[in-house]
Amino acid sequence: MSRGILARLRLSSLRLRLVVVFALVALTAAVAASGIAYWLNREAVLTRTQDGALNDFRQEMQNRVATLPLRPGQEDLRRTAEQMASGSADYQVLLLGERDEGKPIVGASDPDDFTLADVPVSLRQAVDTRRPVTDANPYPYHLFWQRTERGGTPYLVGGTRIEGGGPAGYMFKSLAAEKADLNSLAWSLGIATALAVAGSVLLAQVAATTVLRPVHRLGEAARQLGEGKLDTRLRVTGEDELADLSRTFNGAAESLQKKVADMSAREESSRRFVADMSHELRTPLTALTAVTEVLEDEQDALDPMIAPAVALVVSETRRLNDLVENLMEVTRFDAGTARLVLDDVDIADQITACVDARAWLDAVELDAERGIVVPLDPRRLDVILANLIGNALKHGGSPVRVSVRTEDGELVIAVRDHGPGIPEEVLPHVFDRFYKASASRPRSDGSGLGLSIAMENALIHGGSITASNSVGEDGEVDGAVFVLRLPLDASGITSEVKTRSGRGEVEEA
């Protein structure tokens, strides 16, 4: 049981704080109550014993010592001291008289137990001091007492003197019994304090369990809500603050579910609209593309006044065709229907083929070893390379250097140009859709989707693309660098992808 409690304390800091607070409050209250009880009982016990012994001693001094002659002998003092000590008060007596002027004599009830050396000097001086008799002070001598200790045992020492020059008397009472009683009381109070603290810890556990169980349920519900289970609700019982919190959570979850449903519906509608629009545009675009190809072939024979318009129509038709294809590709990514068709790809050959197909051989430098073969989707890798190299040629200028290496289980392809680089404020947005670095040039040859599609193709392979600026030896920006990282092991691709048996195709589940 204790091991389970400790485990729960380690797992919940709030539970630990509750237990600590309960324990500290209980400890403070128990110590305060025990201290007050001990102090009151100590004073009561000592005062009762002290008053009883001193009153008895005063009465004995009046009854016995006052009857002694003015200068009693030592035997008289001893006999009287023994008579005084034989009472029920249980103390030793020492009587101090004078044989002649300046010649003291001592009579003790038990010289082995109580001698004049046991009487504190300060007490003797107080007893011997004669005070003037006034209306406020009718007696020249008073009874004085003092607590002392001998051999670890507490004692009460009291003394007074007989008026008229009689002997001085001192009593010596052991307080060992009272000390034992007070020690027993202290142990009892200590045990009671420990029990109170232990009880408070158990009560704290019960209270923490009662309070934290709804909090735990709330945390579990919030976790499920964060995982996408928007129908998660809490059972509401009672009318306390935790019940109000549960109602608030349920209201927030219901509102969130409704908003997410509305957003999903709008997103699905927008995605469907883009897909349908792109699909509907493909048919007229196919016809337009065929016409523009004919016009392009006959461009040299056209009237010089018409040729520029024909060239514009051809270029804009191709641009529109590229935009529609890009939109279709983006729609497939958003809808989760993109497919991977894996094949063993020689990276150097793939890059060479990509550059050659677009007539970029004279503007691109390739630094890649032959024989680096990685299972990838060749078409999607071609899309990534075409976008990265084309972007470098368009905005950075030639020569563009493409380097290939393997590093920590990854294929690393770096595309570097020697242009002005990418402005720092643009770097975080280069992979955003339709992002244009210059607001003053909203119309350009690109659609603003190329780098975004390249990133999506890298992500579906389980990789990524990063963009940065290269700094030369003089500290100035010396072009932009795009780094593509793809896993060498195709099994590292997300578990939502499964391989078709007998073929190198991979599709999303």
Image (cartoon, rainbow, N blue to C red):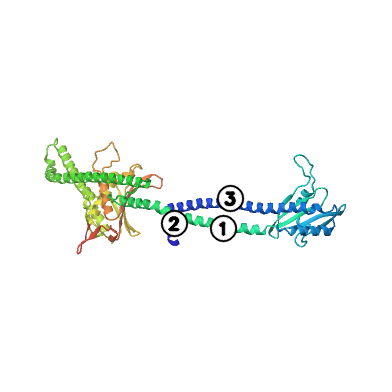
Structural distance between the alpha carbons of marks 1 and 3:
14 Å
For numbered disc 2, what is the local secondary structure?
Answer: helix
Residue located at (45% from left, 53% from top): 204
For numbered disc 3, what is the local secondary structure?
Answer: helix
Pointer 1 with pointer 2, Cβ within 8 A? no
Quadrant where the N terminus lies? bottom left
Front residue of 260 and 173: 173
Front residue of 403 and 186: 186
Extreme residue toward the right, this view? 100
Within-10-Å neighbours for mark 3: few <14, some 14–19, many 20+: few
Structural distance between the alpha carbons of marks 1 and 2:
30 Å
Q: Is residue 400 above or below residue 316?
A: below
Q: Amino acid at mark 3?
A: Ile
Visible residue check, residue 3: yes
Query: Marks 3 and 2: which is nearer the front?
Result: 3
Query: Marks 1 and 2: which is nearer the front?
Result: 1
Quadrant where the C terminus lies? bottom left
Tag of residue 334: none
Pointer 1 with pointer 3, Cβ within 8 A? no
- Residue 236 image offset from top left, x and y in percent: 32, 48
Extreme residue toward the top, this view? 305
| Mark 3 / mark 2, whichever is N-terminal | 2
Q: Is residue 305 above or below residue 352?
A: above
Structural distance between the alpha carbons of marks 3 and 2:
33 Å
Residue on which the image places disc 1 = 188
| Mark 1 / mark 3, whichever is N-terminal | 3
- Residue 78 lies left or right of residue 506; in this view the side is right
Residue on which the image places disc 2 = 9
| Mark 1 / mark 2, whichever is N-terminal | 2
Tag of residue 36: 3
Quadrant of the image occupied by residue 174: bottom right
- Residue 253 image offset from top left, x and y in percent: 30, 46
